[in-house]
Image: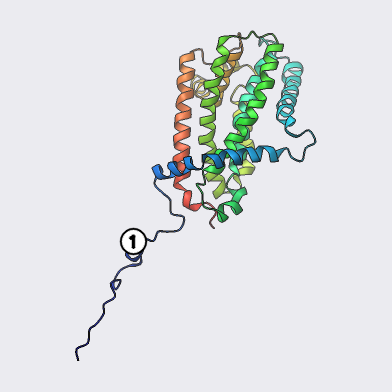
Amino acid sequence: MATTALVDPDTGLTQAQLAARHGLRVAGERPSLVEYSRRLWAYRHFIAAYANAKLVASYSNAKLGQLWQVLTPLTNAAVYYLIFGVVLAQNSIPNFIAYLTTGLFIFNFTQSAVLAGTQSISSNLGLIRALHFPRASLPLSTTITQFQQLLASMVVLVGIVLVTGEPLTWEWLLMVPALLLQAVFNAGVVLLVARLGAKSSDLKQVMPFIMRTWMYGSGVLYSVTLFDRLPGWATTVVQYNPLLVYIELARYALLEEAPLLNESLTQLWLVGAGWALVAGIGGFIYFWRGEQEYGRG
């Protein structure tokens, strides 16, 4: 009687070929950039809800609750005005109070987002390891949380600007696109530092010093005309400092006689839009390339 030998169809195939044949994929494999963007958009409601939850939780243990969203920037403005407006007597700047608070609130938006974003992955490892979702949701939710806090700060800023004698003009509407450009820039930077912070836990210790140095180079606390004393190349570098650009856009919109380092409004808008585009796209791609690394090791 003849015998029939059965040949295993998988014989001789490599593990990769076997996986492809049976439709298996690597767990946590990084999707394409387009697919990743589609998944992230599908999680937009989660991002918004998570951002709101973080905002509420951040003040849940304080007796005054979310009133601190207003009190914190107001207290900071009072302290800096005492030092730079009274002690150091910055009288050469018209309406120094409004000048100072505008720079402080705009800078604080980026500073708070970057400092929180540095730990957005490392502080959520339990969530990352338990659930499967686009990891960019976490740093983006951090940016949204800080944007919500900025809106509360803007209420305080508008009150200060009006009380100190600045007129309400149509130019105030320029604050809307200026803040949106800064928000996109912040999102890109937060995505960048989120990946770096996931790799190195020491970054959160270094970042406050970086942000403090950035503040002094952004004309937040004193007249930007002081930068004219620098060598020509250094002044040019400062002019293209993204935070200085966003601060000057806000000061141009709200204040009538604020000294500006960039005299060309067109240049300010072009540089501001350019930084938002470069940081937003670059930060997103950089974070996406490390998608399969987060929560491992």
Give amino acid for label 1. Ala
Q: Quadrant of the C terminus?
A: bottom right
Quadrant of residue 218 within the rendered picture:
top right
Image quarter for residue 163? top right
Which residue corresponds to mark 1?
20
Q: Is residue 270 above or below residue 52?
A: above
51 horizontally vs 75: left or right: left
The residue shown at (61%, 25%) is: 106
Whether residue 201 is visible to the viewer of this picture, yes or no, is no
Task: Point out the residue furthest to the bottom here.
Answer: 1
Q: Nearer the viewer, residue 68 or 220?
A: 68
Query: Horizontal and vertical percent for residue 194?
Result: 55, 43
Residue under the image location 75 percent in, 26 percent down: 75
Q: Going by the image, does 84 lie left or right of 190?
A: right
- Indicate the quadrant containing the N terminus: top left, top right, bottom left or bottom right: bottom left
Q: What is the residue that sits farthest to the front in this orientation?
A: 1
> What residue lies at 58% left-to-right and 14% top-to-bottom?
172
State whether residue 164 is above or below residue 110.
above
Disc 1 residue crowd, few under 14, some 14–19, many 20+, Cα 10 Å = few
Helix or strand or loop: what does disc 1 sit on? helix
Does the rendering let one see residue 153? Answer: yes
Residue 79 lies, in percent from the top left, at 75, 24
| Residue in the foreground of this view, choosing between 257 and 277 | 277
